[in-house]
Image: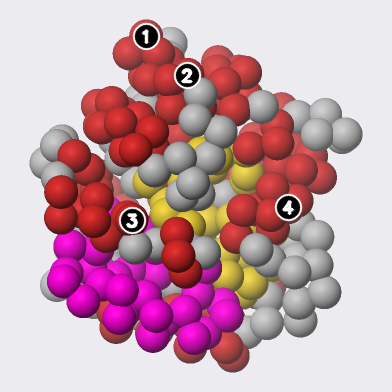
Amino acid sequence: MFIDAHQHFWQYDPERDAWIDDTMKVIRRDFMPSDLKPVLEANEMDGCVAVQADQSEDETEFLLECAARNPFVKAVVGWADLRAENVAESLARFSENLLFKGVRHIVQGEADDFMLRQGFRKGIGALEPFGLTYDILVYARQLPAAVDLVRKFPRQRFVLDHIAKPEISGRPDPEWTKNIRELAKSENVYCKLSGMVTETDNFSWKQEDFTPFLDIVTEAFGTDRLMFGSDWPVCLVAAEYKEVLKIVREYFSQSELPEIMGQNAMQFYGISAISE
């Protein structure tokens, strides 16, 4: 089964979605399951993981409803306020839905010490009893805090989104490289090969631009902890779905692709091969 481990749905709201600036006008519209389904089919993908794009419990409910109505949505990574006193109650409520597999917070928009704060870490500690994963969304400069976080919670399953959003279109920054290697030493951490095309200069790129970055994350994590994610529809500002897919499919060998294109995501998120 081929799984896109990272994509989004939304009903566009100019105020809520102010992060979609003038350079991203192409995605200033609704993107719903009915838009993604034919794209997945055309690219021989069997399913996807829907990931939160808004910091609200309404967002989690919205994604779970999308998944309930569309069997190709195999898992939901939602949002819950990990700093709230009643976070365990929220996680228990959402976990009643078996499609709720994990949580993400948009840490890239927070202070660099956010993941070091006690309130946030208390919430991270509440995830493991429910068997929930955590998606780490950070900029490269925030990786040291991520390294500290994952070491404090060795039994919690983490996945790094978008390879920590390094600046592509040049040689990998040595600090990013060092911190990726440090993060990967924690075997409870996976990494998504996603969000790379939108980190290029002026959204202009060629296949070989990604090679040195893929070399580093593959050496660090190994093929058994990497997973493909399109970051659709955000990727559309820089590439079509098939182009994003091609970056990964052309880099890895045919023997490596089954893990990266589905098996690892299924294992990490607990997606059944017989799910309908």
Q: Label 2: which residue?
A: 181
Q: Amino acid at mark 2?
A: Arg
**Mark 3 or mark 1, whichever is nearer to me:** 3
Residue extending farthest right: 255
Q: Earlier in the sequence, mark 3 or mark 4?
A: 3
Residue type, label 1:
Pro
Instruction: Name the residue nearer the viewer: 159 or 230.
Output: 159
The answer to which of marks 2 and 1 sits earlier in the sequence is: 1
The percent position of residue 133, horizontal first and vertical second, equals 48, 57
Magenta segment, which residues? Answer: 78-106
According to the image, label 3 marks what residue? 125
**Relative to 223, is 39 above or below?**
below
Q: Which residue is mark 1?
A: 174
- Can you tell which of label 3 and label 4 is closer to the viewer? 3
User: First in sequence: mark 3 or mark 1?
Assistant: 3
Is residue 20 in sight in this rendering? no
| Structural distance between the alpha carbons of marks 3 and 1 | 31 Å
Badge 3: how crowded within 10 Å, few (<14), some, or many (20+)?
some
Pair 2/4: label in front: 2
**Which is nearer the N-term, disc 1 or disc 4?**
1
Q: Which residue is mark 4?
A: 262
